Every structure is written in structure tokens, then in C-alpha cells.
Image: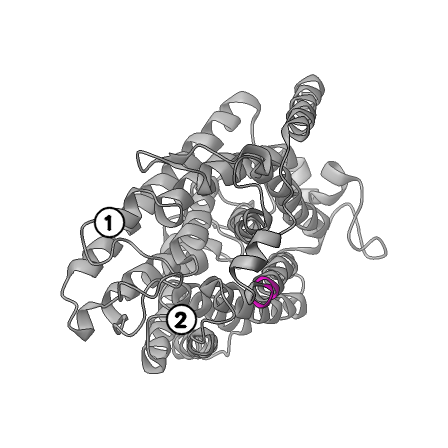
Amino acid sequence: MKKRLLILIGALFIGLWSAGLALAQDPGGAATLEANPQSPVDYVWILVCGFLVFFMQAGFAMVETGFCRAKNATNLMAKNTIDFVVASLLFMAFGFAIMMGQDYNGLFGTTGWFLRGSDYDVGRYLMFFWQLVFAGTAATIVSGAVAERLKFRAYFIYSAIVSLIIYPVYGHWVWGGGWLSKLPFGVGHVDFAGSGVVHTVGGFVGLAGAIILGPRFGKFAKDGKPKAIPGHSITLAALGTFILWFGWFGFNPGSTFSAHQLRIAVVAVNTNLAAAAGAFSALVLVFLKTKKWDVGMMLNGCLAGLVAVTAPCAWIEAWAAVVIGLIAGILVVLSVYFWEARGIDDPVGAVSVHGINGVWGLISVGLFADGTYGLATTNEPLVRGLFYGGGVGQLIAQLIGVGTCIAWAFGLGFIMFKIMDLCFGIRVSPEEEIKGLDIPEHGTPAYPGFYTMNS
């Protein structure tokens, strides 16, 4: 293992060194400024929104850690950190070229390895950073679905494969000029800020991992009924949700890719309304069932609304954002019960929040898009859904994208985790799982003053 890791690092170093020798252009941006004197405003807007999306890594870390037990907190922090570490390096070297390089038969990109080539300029770097923070988000979603039982080595490899293949290839099909964006229905499959490209991908890779790993010890009784395994800090989970809610104001409005697209106001309002509606409907639905005001489910309802509105946020009216959020909150509750009834253990509800509601977000474009706005970069053609006289064309394009995304993410995720499991076993030993992963995997408990070997 150590020898293979050294070979990988060496190959990456040689690639970076050889790429550096070949550079001849100056990416300073003089040509960009000359062509568009207003471009600095757009650059600052996109970068600031990208910084907000990066901060969402902290939100995911807090949500997942809060919903899990204290004995695994260090492990979850490590996994949420390594996501972005691996993504930063491998997405720069290979993933970004596959996603946004020159299109090859609608399948993948072929130019821009190591961020070099004929388009080596500030615009390329700007687009890379924006897609990088999205890639990190897609990768980190899975850590919640496989929490408290996956070996760190397996997660390390998973992060690499998502950054190299799973996210970039599907992202190319939708955002890089690939075949899904050119479907002859509606304006082709569209996904404004990533309900599918980011969230459905992450959610269904997570589902594959959860199935292969199996449930945590103690999650299901002998008769198969699920038992609650409370997380150690609802405070951290709530803090993480607020961080994510805040970060989503970069995630969605920034996807206009221009500060001069005043649609950012519509996007921001729709984002907020869907989050609030999702939290409300999830809270009320669980209360009707249990007579308890379930804060954890309310938090997941909020995130479900955010995920669902991410695809349609620029193309819908405010009332539609509320409806989409209300349905998302209901879906996340029903989905959690659905997976548990089938013996699938998802400790933080990642599959329900991101996978199921990512699908709902994609479908909602084909229903609620109001025909007043088009693609952010050109504002044409206009996106119009079924309820606004657009017919079924856009809905068909969205459904094709949904089926493709699920098959791609779940299929490759299942193959990836299965191969790793056959090669070296991806689940920690029963003893390590019972003690918690912090000490066996990392040698450092998150709460040393409270840690006991029998916790």
C-alpha cells in the first residue's frame, strides 16, 4: 500500500513538473480586461460565492458529526477534510479537464490537463475553482451515509474516484457540453446549480456504500425493526445546518456566473423560501406521527428544501419555491422511513436529503419553470415547464437526466465499493466499530476528557 501511494505521488509530481515546463502564456488577464472592463466585478462575485461553497464543507462536517456518536467525531472530521484535499489535487490534474475540456462525442472532455493548454488564462482558473468546490461538496455527501463503519483507507480511495471519474464525467454530460445538455426535448436537460450533478450523484453513491457496508451494530432489532442511535450533539447538527443554509446563498446565486445577472435576487429568495418550507413540512409531518417536535428531522427538512430548489431556483416563482420545499420536507421524512424499513442504515439521512430530493429538484424544473429566464450565460433559450405551457418536452429531458444520474452514480458507486470490499474489506472490525473509529483509525479522540474505551 505504501509503495503504491508513493508511486501515485511521484506520478503526480512528474505530471506537475512537466506541465510547468511547457507553459508559455501569461494568465494575467489583460486580454480579459480589454474585452470586458466589467469582468472584475463578475470575478469577485464568483470567487466570493465559491468561498461560501467551500465553507459548506464545515457545515457538512458539523451536521454529520452532530448526528453521529462522539466516539467517531475525529473520523468524520478526517473524512470531510480529506474530501477537499484529494479533490483539490486530482480535480486540478485530471478531473477538471474531463469535465470542462473540449467535448469528445458528448462523453467527456479532452483538454486542459493540469490546468494548462491553449486556454491557460484567468477565466480557466476561475471556472476551475468554481467546479472544484462543487466537486468537494459532491464527495463529502457520501461520508454521512457510510458513517461510523467505513475504513478511512476505503474512503480515501473513494474520494479519488469521485474526483477523477464519477463527478467529472456526469458533470460534463450536463454542464460541459455533453449529450444530456443536447437532448432534443425542451432546451435539453438542465440543472441550474446542481440538484443532480452534485446532490443526486453524492446521494446515490452514498446509497451504494450503505448497502454494501450493511447497518451499524445495534441499528436493527432481531425482528428487523429499526432502533434509534442518537447522535451526540444536536447543537453541532443545528450549527452545521445554519452554515449550509448560509453557504447555499453562494451555491445557487453564484451559479449565474455573473454579478450582472440580476436574477441573483430571485435565486436567493427562492433558495431561502424552499429551505424554510422544507423545515416546516418535515417538522409538522413528524409531529403528526410521533407527537414530538423532532429537531433533527426539521434540520434535514431544511436541507432537503435547499437540495430540491438547487436545480430550478433561477427558473421559478416564489410560490413554486415554497411548494417545492414543502414537498421536499415530506419526501425526506418518508424516504428515511422507507430506507430503514428495508434494512439500509444511513446515519445522517444523506440519501434521503441529497439523493431523493436531488431527483425531486430535477423533476420540478420540468413542472415549474416559468419561461421568463434561460441559461445564465446567454439567457436563451427560455426554460419553460409543464405548468407554464411548455408541454412535456422539458419534463422528458429532466426525467432522462434523472434516470441517467441514478444509474451512473449508483452503478459506479456499487462497483467501486464492491471491488474495494473484495480486495481488502471496507468495513472496520466489530471491535473497532464498538469502540469507535477515532482511536483505532486516527489515534486521537475528539473529546479526550470524556473518552472511554467502552463508549
Residue sitting at x 54%, y 74% = 295
Image: 394 above or below 276: above
Give the Cα separation between the discs numbered 1 and 2: 24 Å
Residue sitting at x 47%, y 34% = 111
Residue sitting at x 58%, y 68% = 41
- Of mark 1 and mark 2, the one earlier in the sequence is 2
* Residue 183 in picture, x, y percent from top left: 22, 48
The rendered magenta stretch, by its main secondary structure, is classed as: helix
Q: What secondary structure is found at the residue carrying circle 1?
A: helix
* Residue 8 in picture, x, y percent from top left: 65, 23
* Residue 91 in picture, x, y percent from top left: 56, 39
Residue 166: in magenta span: no
Q: Residues within 10 Å of mark 2 (few under 14, many from 20)?
A: many
Residue indicated by mark 1: 400
Q: What secondary structure is found at the residue carrying circle 2?
A: helix
Q: Nearer the viewer, mark 1 or mark 2?
A: 1
Which residue type does callout 1 highlight? Answer: Ile
Which residue type does callout 2 highlight? Answer: Gly
Question: Which of these two is toward me, 192 or 17?
Answer: 17
On the question of residue 67 being in view, the answer is no
Task: State left or right for residue 369 relative to residue 288.
Answer: left
Residue bounds of the magenta highlight? 40-44
Residue indicated by mark 2: 329
On the question of residue 169 being in view, the answer is yes
